[in-house]
Amino acid sequence: MSKLERLIVMAEDELVQYSTTTRKIEKLRQKVSLSLNVAEQKQAKAELLAEMPTDDISQVVEKNRQTISLPFWGIAGLGLLLGISMEQPLDFIATGIGTVAAIALQKWGWQLQAKRLVLQTLEDIEERTKR
């Protein structure tokens, strides 16, 4: 596992906790400072900037991943309901597709949020070292 991937996993761990973004950055900043030197931090920031998508869809998914996946959860539930109540096994296909799409969107948004948190943390470290 590369150092950047390790940082993203650490950021995902911070996202699990209920706290403000500033507190998450503060906690992650300590971990990043201990695990990477200044040159590696700059390299990781450059890699993240190159890797982060800039299109509108990615930004919406990053900020509203749960809202975006909600219709797919609805499709999954509706397919399950209709498949059971009307005894139509083809409706279970909608359940499968809806569930897979919802989970994929949630996972993608979660990873984008973690990458953004790492990027914000690296920028915070850079700003503090300039002062």
Image (cartoon, rainbow, N blue to C red):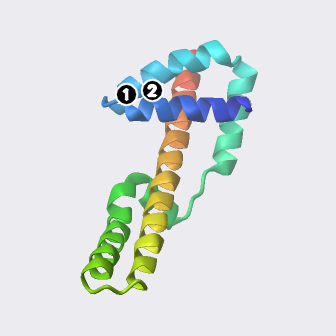
Q: Position of residue 26 (x, y in %)?
A: 43, 20
- Seen in the picture, residue 67 relative to 8 is either above or below; the reply is below
- Seen in the picture, residue 129 relative to 75 is either above or below; the reply is above
Q: Which residue is mark 2?
A: 25
Q: Position of residue 62 (x, y in %)?
A: 45, 53
Residue farthest to the top? 34
The foreground one among 6 and 30 is: 6
Q: What amino acid is found at the position of numbered circle 1 in the picture?
A: Thr
Residue 112 appears left or right of 99:
right
Residue 19, quarter of picture? top left
The foreground one among 57 and 85 is: 85
Residue 22 appears left or right of 43:
left
Which of the numbered marks, if any, corresponds to residue 121? none
Residue 74, quarter of picture? bottom left
Which of the numbered marks, if any, corresponds to residue 22? 1
Residue farthest to the left? 85
- Report helix, strand or loop for mark 1: helix
Dot 2 crowding, Cα within 10 Å, few <14, some 14–19, many 20+:
many
Report if the CB atoms under discs 2 and 1 are less than 8 Å apart: yes
- Seen in the picture, residue 49 relative to 54 is either above or below; the reply is above
Circle count: 2
Asked if one can make out residue 131 in the rendered structure from this viewpoint, the answer is no
Asked if one can make out residue 39 in the rendered structure from this viewpoint, the answer is yes
Residue at 42% of width from left, 61% of height from top? 60
- Distance between mark 2 and mark 1 Cα atoms: 5 Å
Residue farthest to the front? 87
Q: Position of residue 64 (x, y in %)?
A: 36, 56
Q: What amino acid is found at the position of numbered circle 2 in the picture?
A: Ile
In which quadrant of the rendered image does the N terminus lie?
top right
Residue 67 appears left or right of 6:
left
Residue at 71% of width from left, 29% of height from top? 3
